[in-house]
């Protein structure tokens, strides 16, 4: 017989058909209703019943309504600096080189511990210089697949990294007179507002080709097309040039920062870039003949452009209005002075200020189609009481210590110190925009590292 059945038998065995316990017999003195063994069993039944009843109590958490979910999405999009939810076109083919490079860059920054460094938020700001940006060490940069990585300082100082796929590609036919060239064009219209370009690179992959002497030196030049004409050659401005061995294989990165800045100020002047290849004898060669991959090559090796941005100014929220409190002057003799009895922690039954778990899931928000990484992150939050006196475990500031003492003197005028984050760290989010460009954006002060009384 199981415990629940025995409980029902025990509790219902002495009931009459009417459901009322019969009166005790008068022929003998009344004894205990239940023997000790049965009493223990009854207590066990009550314990099991209370546990089952507790499981039926509804949880304090509830599902968000559709309206509340939209409001939460809107708030998070605002923090991410997005006017609305991106709706990229669903990829029908394997990812191209640009998303793969951006994913490698995201993992390299995370693996180097950049996301783990906290930013002190007490008396800090970009102008104050106390805020530190994550540094990507040179040792971590070569792990970016076969790509030649950008400089570590460029990566660490960037707030946003955007990649752009090659939209238009044309080249001079081999039957036409030399010099041979190859043109590329990128759409930079979705550039972020309020940010300045710190660096921009054009990346193209070079494969090994047969018939080329490995020790032969090739000069590859990249120009910005500034003006075109039907009857004459366009006006070109040199952006960058590299000399590479003919036997080299891998990604080549060219500095196109000046062109990117020019296109940012004058979007209509974006006519693309032109690439030339020459030998040491000034002989013009076709880009495809030396192994430079174009749009018709493997998707994982197609050319693309990557641009690094940094916020031109730190956005600040308007200050909140403070409600004035009426102040009454009191004689010094009327001021309460904390006695020795007030030196013990004043605990009102709550728990001390500390960090609590809070996980934000992009998947639960329905954003899996445009957020590449991460699927979510632990944001944490601070909650608890700041008991007097504030010990070292509460990570309190000197101002909070003074405020707590004054609160004891004037509890109606000065509030207690608050439990709040004292150190925050950034996160990086990798996502698609509406044009299927891949964006890596660093968001500061997103993860609570430590809590304290402020």
Image (cartoon, helix red, strand yellow):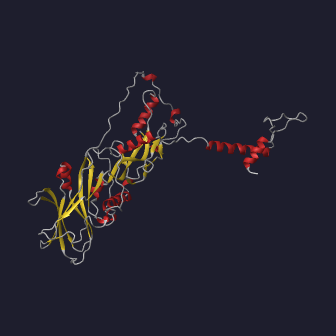
- In the rendered image, the quadrant that contains the C terminus is top left
**Position in image of residue 162 (x %, y %):** 29, 54
In the rendered view, does 174 fall on the left or right side of 127? left
Determine which quarter of the picture holds residue 69: top left
Determine which quarter of the picture holds residue 288: bottom left
**Position in image of residue 99 (x %, y %):** 33, 59
**Position in image of residue 218 (x %, y %):** 18, 71
Hey, which residue is sitting farthest right in the picture?
Answer: 27
Q: Looking at the picture, does residue 422 appear above or below residue 337? A: below
In the rendered view, does 403 fall on the left or right side of 318? right
Q: Nearer the viewer, residue 195 or 446?
A: 195
Q: Nearer the viewer, residue 323 or 283?
A: 283
Q: Nearer the viewer, residue 40 or 398?
A: 40
Q: Nearer the viewer, residue 60 or 175?
A: 175
**Position in image of residue 75 (x %, y %):** 38, 42
Q: Looking at the picture, does residue 21 appear above or below residue 306? A: above
Q: Looking at the picture, does residue 277 appear above or below residue 363? A: below
Q: Residue at x 62, y 42 (%)?
A: 54
């Amino acid at each position: 017989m199981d415990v629940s059945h025995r409980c029902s038998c025990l509790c219902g065995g002495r009931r009459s058909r009417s459901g009322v316990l019969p009166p005790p017999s008068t022929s003998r003195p009344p004894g205990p209703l239940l023997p000790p063994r049965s009493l223990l069993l009854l207590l066990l039944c009550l314990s099991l019943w209370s546990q089952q009843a507790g499981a039926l109590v509804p949880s304090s958490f509830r599902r968000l309504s559709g309206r509340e979910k939209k409001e939460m999405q809107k708030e998070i999009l605002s923090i991410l600096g997005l006017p609305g939810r991106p709706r990229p076109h669903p990829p029908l083919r394997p990812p191209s080189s640009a998303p793969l490079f951006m994913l490698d860059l995201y993992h390299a920054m995370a693996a180097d511990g950049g996301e783990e460094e906290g930013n002190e938020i007490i008396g800090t700001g970009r102008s104050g210089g106390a805020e530190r940006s994550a540094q990507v060490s040179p040792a971590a940069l070569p792990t970016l697949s076969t790509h030649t990585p950008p400089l570590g300082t460029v990566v660490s100082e960037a707030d946003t990294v955007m990649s752009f796929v090659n939209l238009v590609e044309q080249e001079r036919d081999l039957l036409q007179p030399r010099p041979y060239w190859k043109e590329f064009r990128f759409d930079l219209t979705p550039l972020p507002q309020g940010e300045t370009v710190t660096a921009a690179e054009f990346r193209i992959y070079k494969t090994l080709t047969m018939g080329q002497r490995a020790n032969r030196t090739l000069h590859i030049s990249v120009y910005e097309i500034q003006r075109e004409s039907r009857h004459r050659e366009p006006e070109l401005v040199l952006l960058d040039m590299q000399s590479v061995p003919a036997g080299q294989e891998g990604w080549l990165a060219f500095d196109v920062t000046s062109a990117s800045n020019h296109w940012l100020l004058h979007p209509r002047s974006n006519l693309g870039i032109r690439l030339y290849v020459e030998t040491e004898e000034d002989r013009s060669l076709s880009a495809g003949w030396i192994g430079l991959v174009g749009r018709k090559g493997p998707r994982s090796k197609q050319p693309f452009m990557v641009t690094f941005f940094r916020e031109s100014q730190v956005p600040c929220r308007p200050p909140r209005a403070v409600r004035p409190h009426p102040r009454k002057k009191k004689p010094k003799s009327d001021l309460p002075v904390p006695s020795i009895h007030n030196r013990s922690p004043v605990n009102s039954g709550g728990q001390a200020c500390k960090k609590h778990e809070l996980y934000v899931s992009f998947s639960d928000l329905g954003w899996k189609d445009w957020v590449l990484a991460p699927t979510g992150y632990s944001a944490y939050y601070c909650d608890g009481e700041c008991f007097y006196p504030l010990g070292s475990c509460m990570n309190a500031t000197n101002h909070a210590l003074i405020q707590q003492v004054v609160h004891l003197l004037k509890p109606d005028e000065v509030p207690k110190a608050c439990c709040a984050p004292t150190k925050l760290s950034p996160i990086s989010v990798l996502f698609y925009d509406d044009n299927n460009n891949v964006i890596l954006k660093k968001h500061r002060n997103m993860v609570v590292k430590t809590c304290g009384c402020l």
